[in-house]
Image (spheres, grey):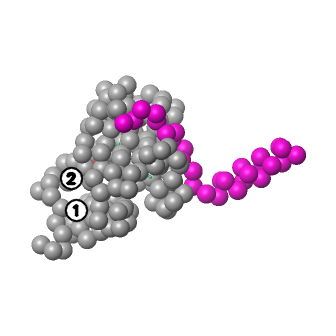
Amino acid sequence: MSRLYFLVAGFSFSAVAESIASFPKGWETWPVVKLSETLPADTVLPPDASLFIQEAVEAYSWINNGEGSPLTIRVNPKKIEEYKTHGPYSDGPTAVAVSEIPGMIWVTEHLSGFPVYGTYDRQGNDISHTHPSLDPDFCDKCHQTYQEICRNGTCTDLVMKSYSSSGGKQQTNDE
Ligand code: HEC
């Protein structure tokens, strides 16, 4: 009886996006490696902006009702050295990107060398089912596709250079 129940529950859950990376306890104290932002929906990118940057802006322009949000990137102190070289990574939670508004914790964890993803609210509730762009498969697609930018599932450093080539500032329609 209980076995049947679990089979049915397991089946119905698999239809909904679920975080694969676990919620890393103590992420608040991890060192900040970068203060970034999700760009507002009305951002006008420079004509030479890479497809990668265009996709990244489009995918998350819904955050904070299109106004963008500060993004704080923190790295597990045990993995700082691995992060500097973009891997190879040991197992366990690797990095978080915290969208400060409305408070979303994006988690990248490594399992047997492979990156897996998850999204949580500040209390640690799994919210990856709340928007299609929070589905771990969606995270994976972007982080894996752009191998020249994201290595071993982490993206930060090299992307920073792309942003700074646009003057380090976003341009908006108002300008
Ligand atoms: C369309 C592309 C794209 C998608 C989709 C995407 N990311 Fe990222 N991710 C990036 C970029 C670009 C950065 C670097 C941001 C910066 O440097 O400002 C990044 C950075 C990160 C970081 C900081 C650590 C690092 O250096 O990589 C984490 C953690 C992260 N993403 C997790 C996720 C999770 C979880 C998802 C899915 C909910 C996701 N990402 C979806 C492009 C993407």
Q: Is residue 148 visible?
A: no
Who's the residue at 44% across and 46% down the image?
Answer: 122
Residue behind mark 2: 162
Residue 71, x across and y down, in percent: 30, 50
As helix, strand or loop, the secondary structure at mark 1 comes to loop
Q: Quadrant of residue 35?
A: top left
Q: Nearer the viewer, residue 79 or 23?
A: 23
Kind of residue at disc 1: Ala
Q: Quadrant of the C terminus?
A: bottom left
Residue 15, x across and y down, in percent: 65, 58
Crowding near the residue tagged with mark 1, few <14, some 14–19, many ≥20 C-alpha atoms within 10 Å: some
In the image, is residue 82 above or below residue 67?
Answer: above
Residue behind mark 1: 49
Who's the residue at 45% across and 60% down the image?
Answer: 133
* Magenta span contains residue 7: yes
Q: Nearer the viewer, residue 32 or 139?
A: 32
Relative side of 84 to 164, left or right: right
Who's the residue at 37% across and 25% down the image?
Answer: 78
Q: CA distance from mark 1 to mark 2?
A: 8 Å
Residue at the far front: name it: 123
Q: Are marks 1 and 2 in contact (CB under 8 Å)?
A: yes
Magenta stretch bounds = 1-28
Residue 90, x across and y down, in percent: 44, 28
Crowding near the residue tagged with mark 2, few <14, some 14–19, many ≥20 C-alpha atoms within 10 Å: some
In the image, is residue 160 above or below residue 12?
Answer: above
Q: Nearer the viewer, residue 91 or 175?
A: 175
In the image, is residue 112 above or below residue 130?
Answer: above
Q: Which is nearer the N-term, disc 1 or disc 2? A: 1
Relative side of 85 to 164, left or right: right
Residue 61, x across and y down, in percent: 34, 65
As helix, strand or loop, the secondary structure at mark 2 comes to helix
Who's the residue at 70% across and 56% down the image?
Answer: 12
